[in-house]
Image (cartoon, helix red, strand yellow):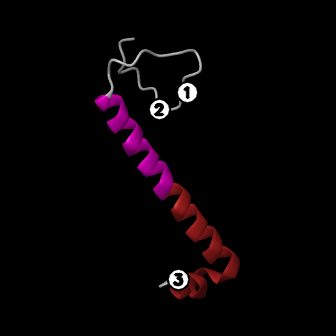
Amino acid sequence: MIDQFFDKFGNTGGVLLIIGIGILFFLIVAFILERQTRKKFPERPKSADDEDFFDFDDDDN
């Protein structure tokens, strides 16, 4: 299966495509797991060092 990417896009394009798909896959997984964690622990108070990357203003804290 991986050889098809290299044949179609060449060595550099195939590698970049596989890396891009991997990064996109892990971002989607991280997004889904973050949403599940926020639903599981809604009473957790926010601290000053919390990241706001996945903050969608759905917290009332």
Could you give the CA–CA distance between mark 1 and mark 2, rounded to whole angstroms?
8 Å
- Residue at the disc numbered 1: 51
- Residue at the disc numbered 3: 2
Residue stretch in magenta: 25-40
Horizontal side of residue 36 vs 31, given as left or right? left
The structure residue drawn at horizontal position 47% and vertical position 32%, both measured from the top left corner, is 54
Could you give the CA–CA distance between mark 2 and mark 3, rounded to whole angstroms?
32 Å
- Residue 1 shown in magenta: no
In this rendered view, identify the residue nearer to me: 46 or 17. Answer: 46
- Residue at the disc numbered 2: 54
Q: How crowded is mark 3: few (under 14 residues within 10 Å), some or many (20 or more)?
A: few
Q: Residue furthest top?
A: 61
Instruction: Locate residue 55, reporting x and y percent.
Output: 46, 26
Instruction: Locate residue 52, reporting x and y percent.
Output: 53, 26
Question: Do the residues under discs 3 and 1 have CB atoms within 8 angstroms?
Answer: no
- The numbered mark at residue 23 is none
Secondary structure found at label 3: helix
Secondary structure found at label 1: loop
The structure residue drawn at horizontal position 58% and vertical position 69%, both measured from the top left corner, is 17
In this rendered view, identify the residue nearer to me: 60 or 12. Answer: 60
The structure residue drawn at horizontal position 52% and vertical position 82%, both measured from the top left corner, is 2
For badge 3, the amino acid type reads Ile
For badge 1, the amino acid type reads Glu
The structure residue drawn at horizontal position 55% and vertical position 57%, both measured from the top left corner, is 23
Q: How crowded is mark 1: few (under 14 residues within 10 Å), some or many (20 or more)?
A: few
Q: How crowded is mark 2: few (under 14 residues within 10 Å), some or many (20 or more)?
A: few
25 up-or-down from 15: above or below = above
Quarter of the image holding residue 32?
top left
- Quarter of the image where the C terminus is located: top left
Question: Do the residues under discs 2 and 3 have CB atoms within 8 angstroms?
Answer: no
Quarter of the image holding residue 43?
top left
Could you give the CA–CA distance between mark 3 and mark 1, rounded to whole angstroms?
36 Å
